[in-house]
Image (tube, grey):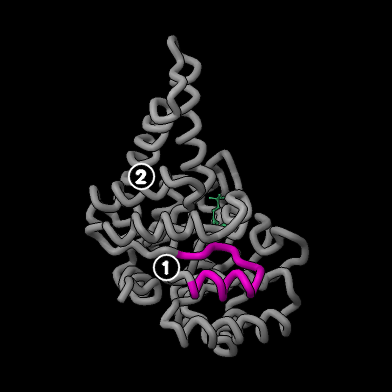
Amino acid sequence: GFPSLAELAREAAAQRVGLGAFNVIQLEHATALVRAAEQVGRPVVLQISQNAARYHGALEPVLLATLAVARAATVPVVVHLDHAEDTDLVRRAVELGVHSVMYDGSHLDYEANVASTAEMVAFCHAAGVGIEAELGEVGGKDGVHAPGARTDPEEAAAFVEATGVDLLAVAVGSSHAMTTRDAVLDTELIAALAERLPVPLVLHGSSGVSDEGMQAAIAAGMTKINVSTHLNKVMTAAVRAVLEGPDAPVDPRKWMAPGRQAVQDEAARLLRLYAGS
Ligand code: G3H
Ligand code: ZN
């Protein structure tokens, strides 16, 4: 079998530690993130979003490459489909061997989100695949993760009960694609949600949260910590330094390797921070 996101997240939640979930855009991300997890001796989630699949023209090449990297790892590595709004993409990912999925029905109204998520839960669970979902609170594209959006604990409890999801993404003050780390999280709400909900909580848009903010969020009961932009920023800075330096290389391996190393170093640091070590 393959590692179970639900199980790893439940273990992390019980221990009040964070489970790092980092996005894979290119093969170099997957390699860097697995090396980081092995270095720290912690599990990691490698996530591929619907947008990343679109960038590659299809899910298959990026998912199969990531699965191959994950399979060779010496620590548990969960390969996860991130932010899938397309139910056909969820089905395709499961057929291709993905370990877990995030079905994002937050663009739908509450009743439609419940119905469609419950259908995806049945499909995923039949294949032994874990499923994370998101509850839309505010309309519009990035609604649930607009900084002002908040998840209501009672509505979230009803949603989890009605759908049977394994993890729930909640809105507690973070917002996607921040390039500064000054988001202010509502740790009291995190504690209330962790107390009320029978499933581990997921924080999206974690790039905007400082180290101290993340430690407080994890202590309050946040479990799966999704980071993408921050590691891309680190990768791009390292690549830029090489390309702006003297004798800028032409061989992509010469400028990608420092980018990959920078992601490994920062991901290892974050995994240690989330583990409280
Ligand atoms: O699902 C992915 C995460 O929510 C990443 O968000 O790029 O703001 O860290 P971020
Ligand atoms: Zn997200």
The answer to whether residue 173 is magenta is no
Closer to the camera in the image, 272 or 133: 133
Residue 254: % across, % down: 39, 26
Quadrant in which the N terminus is drawn: bottom left
Residue 196 visible from this viewpoint: no
In the displayed structure, 104 sits above or below 277; it is below
Amino acid, disc 1: Gly
Image coordinates for residue 128, horizontal then vertical, percent? 41, 82
Q: Is residue 223 above or below residue 210?
A: below
Q: Earlier in the sequence, mark 2 or mark 1?
A: 2
Closer to the camera, 271 or 193?
Answer: 271
Residue identified by numbered label 2: 32
Residue bounds of the magenta highlight: 80-95
Q: Residues within 10 Å of mark 1 (few under 14, many from 20)?
A: many
Which residue shows up at 29% across the image and 64% down it?
A: 76
Q: CA distance from mark 2 to mark 1?
A: 27 Å
Amino acid type, mark 2 = Ala
Instruction: Kindly identify which residue carries mark 1.
Output: 221
How dense is the environment of label 2, judged by Cα within 10 Å: few (below 14), some, or many (20 and up)?
many
Residue at image location 57% in from the left, 68% down from the top:
170
Q: Is residue 43 above or below residue 206?
A: below
